[in-house]
Amino acid sequence: MQLQRENYAALGPVAGPYSHSVVHANTLYTSGLTAFGTEHQKGSIDAQARSVFKQLASICAANNTSLAMLVKVTLFVSDMGEIAPLRAALFDIYGEHIPASSLIAVNSLFSEDLSIEVEAIVALAV
C-alpha cells in the first residue's frame, strides 16, 4: 500500500523535513498546522484556531473530504488560560461533527506569536 505525501501551495512552502499531509489507505493525516504567516498569527487563540481549521478545510477539500469527517484532533496550546474562547470556537467549527480530541499544554510553540497548533486525522470517502 502506497503513501501519498502532499504539500499544498495555498499553505505556503514547508520550512522543514515534513509534508503537510500523508494519506494511507482511507485516512488523511496532517502535520501540525498553525496560524503562522496568516493575518491571525498575532491574534487571539480563537482567531488562530479558526485560521488553522480553514487551512485544514482546504486540505480536506483537496482530498475530497470535509471537516465533518474529522476522526481525531490533537491540540497543542501554550496558554491554558485561553481554553474558554478556544472551546467556543471549536464548538462553532465542529457543529454536530465533534471528533475525538486530545489537548496538550506546551511551554511554547515555534513562534512566540502562536497560541495553538493542531494535528488532525480525517476519514476519506471509500
Image (cartoon, rainbow, N blue to C red):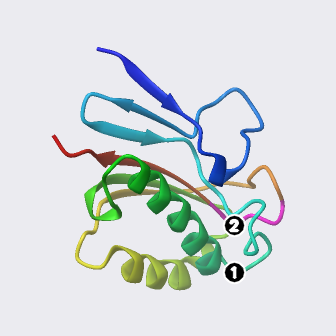
The secondary structure making up most of the magenta span is: loop
Q: Nearer the viewer, residue 74 or 15?
A: 15
The residue type indicated by label 2 comes to: Ser
Label 1: state its secondary structure: loop
Across and down, in percent, residue 105 comes to 60, 58
Q: Nearer the viewer, residue 24 or 87?
A: 24
Q: Are marks 2 and 1 in contact (CB under 8 Å)?
A: yes
Dot 1, crowdedness within 10 Å: few (<14), some or many (≥20)?
Answer: some
The residue type indicated by label 1 comes to: Ser
Q: Which residue is mark 1?
A: 44
Which numbered disc, 2 or 1, marks the residue that appears first in the sequence?
1
Residue under the image location 69 percent in, 66 percent down:
115
Q: In the rendered view, does 121 fall on the left or right side of 49?
A: left
Whether residue 81 is visible: no
Residue under the image location 74 percent in, 64 percent down:
114
Across and down, in percent, residue 37 comes to 78, 61
Across and down, in percent, residue 68 comes to 27, 64
Spatial CA span between label 2 and label 1: 8 Å
Q: In the rendered view, does 12 fall on the left or right side of 94?
A: right
Looking at the rendering, which quadrant does residue 90 occupy?
Answer: bottom left
Looking at the rendering, which quadrant does residue 3 occupy?
Answer: top left
Q: Which residue is mark 2?
A: 115
For the magenta stretch, what is the residue range?
A: 112-116
- Compared with residue 66, is residue 2 higher up or lower down, i.e. above or below? above
Whether residue 89 is visible: yes
- Compared with residue 23, is residue 117 higher up or lower down, i.e. above or below? below
- Compared with residue 50, is residue 18 higher up or lower down, i.e. above or below? above
Q: Is residue 103 magenta?
A: no
